[in-house]
Amino acid sequence: MTPTSTIPDGSADRYDGPPPARFAYDRHTWREIAYLLSGLPVALLGFVYTVVMVAVGAGLSVTVIGLPLLAAGLAGSRVLGRWERARARALLGVRVDEPSPLPRRRDGGTLGRLWTGLKDPVGWRTVLYGFIRLPWAVLSFVVTLVGLFVLWPVLPYVVRAMANADRAMVRGLLSPSDELERRIAELESDRGVVVDTAAADLRRIERDLHDGAQARLVALAMGLGLAKEKLLEDPDAAAAMVDEAHGEVKLALQELRDLARGIHPAVLTDRGLDAALSSVASRCTVPVQVTVDLPARPAEAIEGIAYFTVSELLQNVSKHSGARTAAVEVWRREDRLLIQVRDDGHGGAAPTGGTGMAGLAERLGAVDGLFVVDSPAGGPTVVTAELPWRDRVQTDRGVAAKAGTGRAGMGRAGTRPAPGARTR
């Protein structure tokens, strides 16, 4: 992200940098002069703090207090960096994002937090800024001060050149690493989503077991106990109870099979996405055309997410779309696994519509996936999901099951849409 500048007077106009320097001194030139003149005392304060902090922390590192002092000093350097970013924002118009705070580690204890503070890249970059800023601040201060009396006709151009050097230092040393910081924030958010999803799945499994199979098995045990008591007194009633218990066993087994299918279907493990999605499509209330074109099976986690994504989307087609037909396509493009589910229903689907799409978007986002819904009023609805492709760890079972993945015989060839046609 390229840092942008704003007019410091609070107006709404935005520009990529200050206007060109002119012989006439405007407010931007005066702000740059103020920044360069105030830079010497600020740089001197930062240099003294940095030298003392590093010297004391490194010198006492042989004792038990040295490394904690160094970690605390790096935390203080973060504060100095925040003040410098504020000064550059006010006088130079440099907009620099604030770095992410240090992650709070709960598993490593005191040593883990200490190590996190010692390897803080933001703190060390601020330390480097404090070291190199002082000599430059002395030079720019002297040139600016002398120029106010000797070089005043060309001083705006000289000041602009030195201010641009300061802008470069602020952006290079005091700005966060955009990609790294963004990635850290995404991973922290995704970790929370994964934890919440796993907890919700565990609660659902516990609830289904308690309300379904467990209740039936308890009733079955009570029925068999009564049948045992009546076996000698009333054989006919005992036989009827055993027959009823037999029916309860069948229902309990069916509920356990349905629950196991909801956790991870056996057909997906044994035969891959092609057969598993065909099985899901057969349970949909509208005819579904399935096309799976994969050169190999992806990693088990990616394969499972793809299966449950299609399963949830086809449930939405059955319950909410009013469609007559639907289609599912799965293929690989470079390092992405792409899924597209289409139906000719009345449209109007949205991730905020309470159809489970928000949960799908969160689940896909937790693994660097994308979830795109294109559903205008009146239809059709096209839902596209992208997942990162990861190769499956080859085992004997995986090699044997690899042959189960191919192109569905009932699918159409050449119906794959161009990714560029999707709207997000």
Image: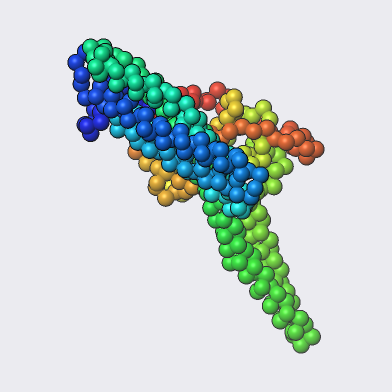
The C terminus: image quadrant: top left
| Residue 175 as seen in the image, left or right of residue 38 | right
Q: Indicate the quadrant where residue 299 lies.
A: top right
Q: Residue at 58% of width from left, 33% of height from top? A: 388
Q: Residue at 49% of width from left, 47% of height from top? A: 359
Q: How many marks?
A: 0
Q: Residue at 49% of width from left, 29% of height from top? A: 131
- Spot occupied by residue 172 in the image (x, y as percentages of width and height): 45, 26
- Spot occupied by residue 114 in the image (x, y as percentages of width and height): 59, 47
Q: Residue furthest bottom?
A: 233
| Residue 158 as seen in the image, left or right of residue 310 | left
Q: Indicate the quadrant where residue 3 lies.
A: top left
- In this orientation, does residue 312 appear? no
- In this orientation, does residue 301 appear? yes
Q: Residue at 23% of width from left, 34% of height from top? A: 10
The N terminus: image quadrant: top left
- Spot occupied by residue 277 in the image (x, y as percentages of width and height): 61, 40
Image vertical order of residue 41 relative to residue 238, above or below: above
Image vertical order of residue 346 relative to residue 389, above or below: below
Front residue (pair 31, 333)? 31
Type of colouring: rainbow
Front residue (pair 19, 301)? 19
Q: Indicate the quadrant where residue 323 lies.
A: top left
Front residue (pair 158, 96)? 158
Front residue (pair 182, 310)? 182
- Spot occupied by residue 95 in the image (x, y as percentages of width and height): 35, 31
